[in-house]
Image (spheres, helix red, strand yellow):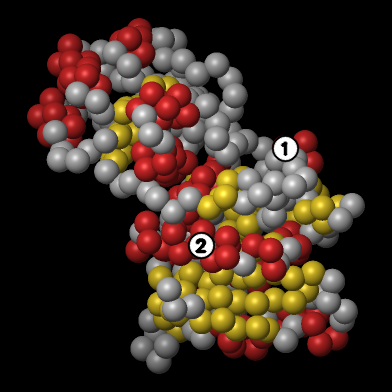
Amino acid sequence: MNYKIVRLNTAAKSEITSSVLIIYTGGTLGMAYDESGALVPFNFGQILEKIPTLTSMNAAITVISFPEPIDSSNVNMQHWVDMAYIIYENYDSYDGFVVLHGTDTMAYSASMMSYMLQGLSKPVIFTGAQLPISAMRSDARENLMTSLEIATAKANGKPIVPEVCIFFNHMLLRGNRSKKVQSVHFDAFESENYPPLAESGIVIDYNYASIKPFEEGKKLKYFNQLDNNVMVLKLFPGITQNIMDSCFATKGLRGVVLETYGSGNSPSERWFIESLEKAVKKGLIILNVSQCNGGRVIQGRYETSKDLKRIGVLSGGDITTEAAITKLMFLLANENSDSEIRRKLIQPIAGEMSLTAQV
Ligand code: ASP
């Protein structure tokens, strides 16, 4: 990958005490209006003109830009491999990392990074903006400045937040617990099933009890294999056997995130259960995730989910769809056996689900 590297001369007025790497992937934050009024990525070398307060930070800031910044709706597996590799390759040289990313798929990318970068003991903070940095009422400045502060924050010489997070609109959320829930207002992200890791006001209030503890001497492991022979199948009243069977017959398909209702419920009609059972029997891995943002799957709580458990559909507990589909892509490529994939799907591997009994 042909990165563009920009070192910003930000510490002109103060002493450098920390270092941070910004990885600019694209998204609204880094766009400006061109003459025709369309939003296009601007040259990140000009960031100091847009945010002069960067010069008052006492951190050395380097920016690595994707050669072609993307709208995050175009993110693909190669972009994830690139993001993870940039962090891995530069891991020892920086105190923390800020990934500038479009909001549309930020929760997917942050989830994926939490799996691809295991043994992480430094902050990786995803952020972006609802309005471009050049817009008068933009949220970009606050999101970026606070992310930089969090990425370099230490207590007793150790990083306060040694995990992959999303910082947006004053809230720091665990990346693989987050969801984009708002496309117009500034409060774009929520994490219904896990408490915020910090809230920023006149100070940044860290919720120490919920942050993954720093582990001394952890070595970063980077995984670069992913498998996208997966799908999300969202149930809706009126879904037909034909649609279900056709989905499960897709050539190469290995895993399905089944978005069910409420606490993991589905139709209990015979054809529906039989269609799923046939799919499980032929080796498909099916993970039950709720369409609700909060709460969790409890297979067997209602009669309408008892059969799912019996035929071998796995419970995703309180995982989000974003964290579930990326976890499936990750495990399918990195585990040797289906039994190991199934075992890891129903337990947390990077804090993406709660440790309650998975049923
Ligand atoms: N479509 C944009 C993106 O995800 C929206 C944003 O940046 O917020 O890249």
Q: CA distance from mark 1 to mark 2?
A: 27 Å
The residue type indicated by label 1 comes to: Ser
Q: Residue at x 25, y 13 (%)?
A: 268
Q: Residue 210, labelled with which disc?
A: 1
In the image as oriented, which residue stretches furthest toward the left?
Answer: 242
Pick whichever, 188 or 62, lies toward us.
Answer: 62
Residue 175 seen: no
The residue type indicated by label 2 comes to: Tyr
Q: Residue at x 42, y 88 (%)?
A: 34
Q: Residue 85, labelled with which disc?
A: 2
- Judging from the image, what secondary structure is the residue with disc 1 in? helix
Image quadrant assignment for residue 255 = top left
Q: Is mark 1 within 8 Å of ligand 1?
A: no
User: Is residue 108 placed above or below 61 in the rendered structure?
Assistant: above
Q: Residues within 10 Å of mark 2 (few under 14, many from 20)?
A: some
- Judging from the image, what secondary structure is the residue with disc 2 in? helix
Q: Is residue 21 left or right of residue 262?
A: right
Image quadrant assignment for residue 280 = top left
Label total for image: 2
Q: Residue at x 37, y 56 (%)?
A: 77
